């Protein structure tokens, strides 16, 4: 549960993707009115005074923007893969990461993003 400005936000589903010194968190949360939204958090590990600190950046994505967001992201990724780096073999990155973590949701597969 996340507490911010006195408001509780229940976490429904979560996926973690580790990428070197960065970790990405994709979290589905609910509002008081049982509506859902997505938070995307980038956490970067940095060294400060001989210890590690984490710098975080967060994006809130609401249901009315899911389709536009996914379409734009896919367009940009396709442009890089097909137009800018067409000679690069991206298949080396296709294997699912062994330590990717999925937190089960009580709703099963009912939540669909498209």
Image (cartoon, helix red, strand yellow):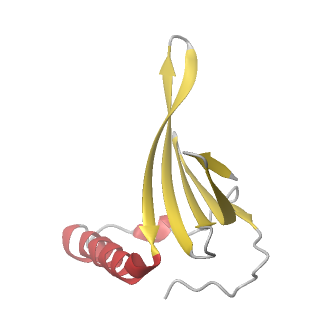
Which residue is rendered at x = 28% and y = 78% of the image?
Answer: 75
Which residue is rendered at x = 54% and y = 26% of the image?
Answer: 53
Is residue 38 toward the left or the right of residue 108 in the image? left
Residue 77 position, x and y percent, is: 32, 71
Above or below residue 48? Residue 86 is below
Given residues 51 and 35, the one toward you in this image is 35
Is residue 28 toward the left or the right of residue 22 in the image? right
Given residues 54 and 11, the one toward you in this image is 11
| Figure label count | 0
Which residue is rendered at x = 77% and y = 70% of the image?
Answer: 104
Residue 13 position, x and y percent, is: 68, 68
Q: Residue furthest left?
A: 83
Q: Residue furthest top?
A: 49
Which residue is rendered at x = 27% and y = 72% of the image?
Answer: 76
Is residue 77 toward the left or the right of residue 28 in the image? left
Given residues 20 and 9, the one toward you in this image is 9
Tell me which corner region of the image, top left, top right, bottom left or bottom right, holds residue 96.
bottom right
Residue 52 position, x and y percent, is: 57, 23
Tell me which corner region of the image, top left, top right, bottom left or bottom right, holds residue 12.
bottom right
Tell me which corner region of the image, top left, top right, bottom left or bottom right, holds residue 51.
top right
């Amino acid at each position: 549960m996340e507490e911010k400005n006195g408001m509780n936000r229940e976490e429904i589903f979560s996926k973690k993707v580790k990428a070197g010194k960065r970790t990405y968190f994709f979290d589905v949360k609910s509002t008081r009115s049982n509506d859902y939204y997505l938070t995307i958090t980038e956490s970067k590990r940095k060294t400060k005074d001989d210890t590690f600190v984490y710098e975080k950046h967060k994006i809130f994505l609401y249901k009315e923007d899911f389709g536009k967001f996914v379409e734009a992201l896919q367009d940009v990724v396709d442009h890089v893969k097909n137009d800018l780096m067409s000679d690069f073999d991206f298949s080396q990155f296709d294997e699912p990461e062994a330590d990717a973590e999925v937190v089960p949701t009580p709703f099963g597969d009912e939540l669909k993003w498209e």
